Image: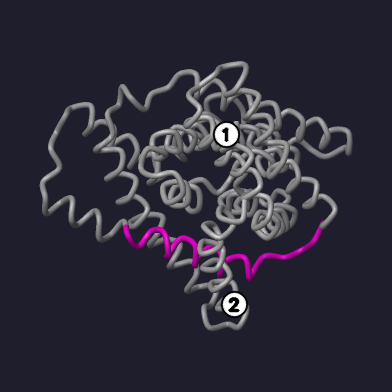
Amino acid sequence: MVEIFLRTLPFFAIIGLGYGAGLKGFFTAEATAYLTKFVFYFALSAMIFRFSATLPVAEIFDVNLILGYLVGCFAVYGLATLIAGLRRQGGGTAAVEAQCATIGNTGFLGLPMMAALFGEGAIGPVMIMLGVDLIVFSSLIVIVINTSGGTRGLAALKLAALGLVKNPMIVSIVAGLSWSALQLPVPAPFNDFLTILGAAATPGALFAIGASLATKSAERVQTALWLSFAKLVIHPACVALGVLWLFPVSTFSATVAISTAALPVAGNVYMLAQHYNVAPHRASAAIFLSTLISIVTLPLVIAWAGGT
């Protein structure tokens, strides 16, 4: 446990560094936005493409992992939606809360952290879960919010599809796996280019997470604490049920899946909530609190998952 905590600590230390820079105004909100854009569109995309282009598609496409992860996600998603309904929240607000309880910071934090903790073998399972998050749940929240707001049928589906096509992480995964499926070699200069650019993803993403947290509010703390508990505890527990018993996968994949499910709430949940002006403050607070609490809970879950 102590060893895992010490191995995850540098990741959170860089987040803390970014938070301090944002809090003191050394890194402004505008600077953070541009750093996030650089990481999102360039550095992280290069990292994802390079990893996926060299991964054998047949080896990483694990149907049981997809189904087990989906079952776990839909279980906590349904629970969060039910509780939001019992609290008489609207459809859009319920969708944002369910998204907070389900979607972790897999791209910016999970991919580099799991690769560092478990080796490059973890990249395949993490990318599968990232793909599920982006394709299934990022589409679902757009459809639910727009449907609640009066947009119906093909119009809502078009908005969701457009969001997927414009997402550089989806484009990078699809392009990389297509490259791998065609068994195309990655030329050495191109590989070096991707390696150098992708190396900026981990520190850049972590710093950007921290700097963005400095602008987050701590309003609606009670709701945010519940959503943080759902994301950091209930979600990995549900995913464990899915990948260990309902749709069993290898011990290694199960460990990576459960650990990834224990990540704090993703920043893009706030971006969506702010874009549609649906419960942005509770999403903001959930991101802030879950990231802070995960300094302790994430190593605990990783240590437990490693012993399964």
By secondary structure, the bulk of the magenta-drawn segment is best described as: helix
Identify which amino acid the numbered label 2 is placed on: Gly
Magenta-highlighted residues: 199-220
From this viewpoint, is residue 131 visible? yes
* Circle number at residue 20: 2
At 44% from the left and 33% from the top, the residue drawn is 125
At 82% from the left and 57% from the top, the residue drawn is 221
Q: Please identify, in this view, whether the residue under mark 1 or under mark 2 is nearer the observer.
A: 2
Residue 118, position in %: x, y? 44, 44
Disc 2, SS:
helix
Residue nearest the viewer, comparing 183 with 40: 183
Residue nearest the viewer, comparing 30 with 223: 223
Quarter assignment of residue 137: top right
Most extreme residue toward the top, as rendered? 246
**Is disc 1 in contact with disc 2, using a CB cutoff of under 8 Å?**
no
Residue 120, position in %: x, y? 36, 43
How far is the residue under mark 1 from the one under mark 2? Answer: 32 Å
Disc 1 marks which residue? Answer: 137
Q: Earlier in the sequence, mark 1 or mark 2?
A: 2
Identify which amino acid the numbered label 1 is placed on: Phe
* Circle number at residue 259: none
At 79% from the left and 38% from the top, the residue drawn is 90
Left or right of residue 183: residue 297: right
Any magenta on residue 205? Answer: yes
